[in-house]
Amino acid sequence: MPVSYRPLGMIAEMIEQMDLKVTHAWEDLVFISHNAFLLKMGDRGELVYLYFNQESDPGRRDEIADQLTALAADRGLQVFNSGAYLMKPRDDEQIDIHFHESS
């Protein structure tokens, strides 16, 4: 069964199974409680890209990635550990997100 474009409901279920919550979704980005990582939905429904906050605990990243990958596979999704991000506040009360792709 094909996965719908931008499957926010499926992603929210996965995140809840990790005892976390989706705090905000904007276009293709899904923000998660505690801000250790965010997810970016791909141009096909089954593609999900994982980015860790540069300020998150590096010792927990593999565990989080493994857990997300397993939960995603149960739903027909593919999670790719894609790099890191940094959020910087702007003067106009907005936030800039800078992505750093893994090589």
Image (cartoon, grey):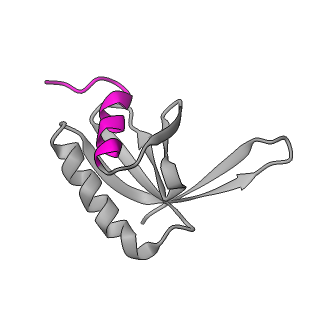
**Residue 45 appears left or right of 102:** left
- When the figure is inspected, residue 29 is found, relative to residue 38, above or below; the finding is above
Residue 7 percent across, percent down from the top left: 34, 29
Residue 69 percent across, percent down from the top left: 24, 53
Q: Quadrant of the C terminus?
A: bottom left
What residue is rendered at 38% in x and 30% in y?
Answer: 8
Residue stretch in magenta: 1-17
**Residue 89 appears left or right of 14:** right
What residue is rendered at 55% in x and 66% in y?
Answer: 54
Residue 35 percent across, percent down from the top left: 53, 54
View extreme (right): residue: 91
Write down the quadrant of residue 76 in the picture: top left
View extreme (front): residue: 19
View extreme (bottom): residue: 59
Residue 87 percent across, percent down from the top left: 65, 55
Residue 50 painted magenta: no
What residue is rendered at 33% in x and 61% in y?
Answer: 64
Q: Quadrant of the N terminus?
A: top left
Write down the quadrant of residue 10 in the picture: top left
Q: How many marks?
A: 0
Which sits in the foreground, 47 or 12? 12
Which sits in the foreground, 76 or 43? 76
What residue is rendered at 23% in x and 44% in y?
Answer: 72
- When the figure is inspected, residue 87 is found, relative to residue 60, above or below; the finding is above
**Residue 78 appears left or right of 11:** left
- When the figure is inspected, residue 99 is found, relative to residue 103, above or below; the finding is above
